[in-house]
Image: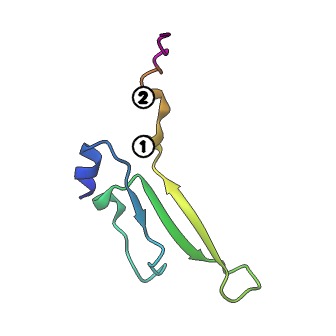
Amino acid sequence: WVSEAHRNGWHVLLDATALVVGEDRLPLSLHRPDLVLCTLDDTHSQQPSAKVTCLLVRRRSFDTSALPPPQPQQKQ
């Protein structure tokens, strides 16, 4: 379904917050999402359940140099 979304010009967000670091594997090369949302345990925090949430962005997905220049609006 990721390929189908890309063919339709959509960006794909993969929510990986439920995965456990060191136990679960996420083959990003297979799914090729544009964005990945993940949560990691903060081992340096004094709080027992501290978590760090991050958003990984694929650089190619947001290369603005590939976008066409905006068209000027026509006056009516």
The amino acid marked with disc number 2 is Ala
Q: How is the image coloured?
A: rainbow
Q: Residue at x 49, y 78 (%)?
A: 21
Q: Residue at x 51, y 69 (%)?
A: 38
Residue position marked by numbered label 2 in the rendering: 66
Q: Is residue 63 above or below residue 31?
A: above
Q: Position of residue 25 (x, y in %)?
A: 37, 75
Q: Residue at x 44, y 78 (%)?
A: 19
34 is within the stretch colored magenta: no
Q: Is residue 61 above or below residue 18?
A: above
Q: Is residue 24 above or below residue 34?
A: below
Farthest front residue?
Answer: 76
Which quadrant holds residue 18? bottom left
Q: Is residue 5 left or right of residue 71?
A: left
Which of pointers 2 and 1 lies earlier in the amino acid sequence? Answer: 1
Q: Is residue 40 left or right of residue 15?
A: right
Residue position marked by numbered label 1 in the rendering: 61
74 is within the stretch colored magenta: yes
- For label 2, the crowd category at 10 Å Cα-Cα, with few meaning under 14, some 14 to 19 and many 20 or more, is few
Q: Position of residue 4 (x, y in %)?
A: 22, 51
Farthest top residue?
Answer: 75
Q: Position of residue 8 (x, y in %)?
A: 26, 44
Q: Position of residue 49 (x, y in %)?
A: 65, 86
> Regarding mark 2 in the picture, which secondary structure is present there?
helix
> Regarding mark 1 in the picture, which secondary structure is present there?
helix
Q: What range is drawn magenta here?
A: 71-76
The answer to which of 76 and 13 lies nearer the viewer is 76
- For label 1, the crowd category at 10 Å Cα-Cα, with few meaning under 14, some 14 to 19 and many 20 or more, is few
**Which mark is drawn over residue 24?**
none
Q: Main secondary structure of the magenta part?
A: loop
Q: Residue at x 57, y 64 (%)?
A: 54
The answer to which of 69 and 45 lies nearer the viewer is 69
